Image (tube, rainbow, N blue to C red):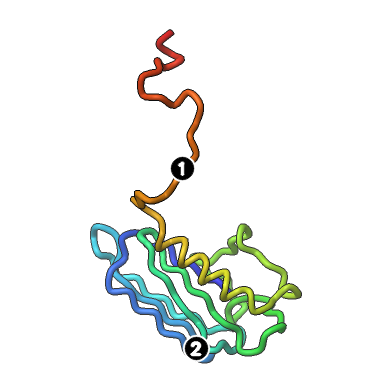
Amino acid sequence: VFIEFCVEDSKDVNVNFEKSKLTFSCLGGSDNFKHLNEIDLFNNIDPNESKHKRTDRSILCCLRKGESGQAWPRLTKERAKLNWLSVDFNNWKDWEDDSDEDMSNFDRFSEMMNNMGGDDDVDLPEVDGADDDSPDSDDE
């Protein structure tokens, strides 16, 4: 289960995984606004196998279900609609396809995030007509 807290420029990030609860807190933004969320989860997770990763724009949490292969009809124990919580359908995966590859995807995501930025060793493909000496098409 992936949960992303979208908080730019987060500081003092604290993510606590418990068997049936996730607690998240941080200071965010230029005004150091305090964010705090406690989520009573629908079912148990494995706190030791759950991980989180901080980026400049968000904190991504990967929760390992306590019982793999079991579908959760929702994230929270309560049926109440939380206005700050929504589904990211870009990362949707059917529960029937649930497998151990989820954590490896998170590890690959973390690796990708660590490699983002000004890496001078990256070989980028050359683009035809991208020479600095060539005139812009609008200038002709």
Q: Is residue 21 left or right of residue 68?
A: left
For disc 2, the marked residue is 47
* Residue 101 screen position, x and y as percent: 63, 74
Q: Is residue 84 above or below residue 137?
A: below
Kindly check if marks 1 and 2 are in contact, taking CB atoms under 8 A apart as contact: no
Foreground mark, 1 or 2, reads: 1
Disc 2 marks a residue whose amino acid type is Pro
Q: Which residue is mark 1?
A: 124
Residue density around tag 2, few if under 14, some if 14–19, many if 20 or more, within 10 Å = some
Helix, strand or loop under label 2: loop
For the point 36% across and 24% down, the residue is 132
Q: Residue furthest right?
A: 96
The residue sitting at the bottom extreme is: 19
Q: Residues within 10 Å of mark 1 (few under 14, many from 20)?
A: few
Question: Quadrant location of the C terminus?
Answer: top left
Task: Please provide percent x and percent y for residue 11.
Answer: 28, 69
Answer with left or right where residue 19 lies relative to residue 94: left
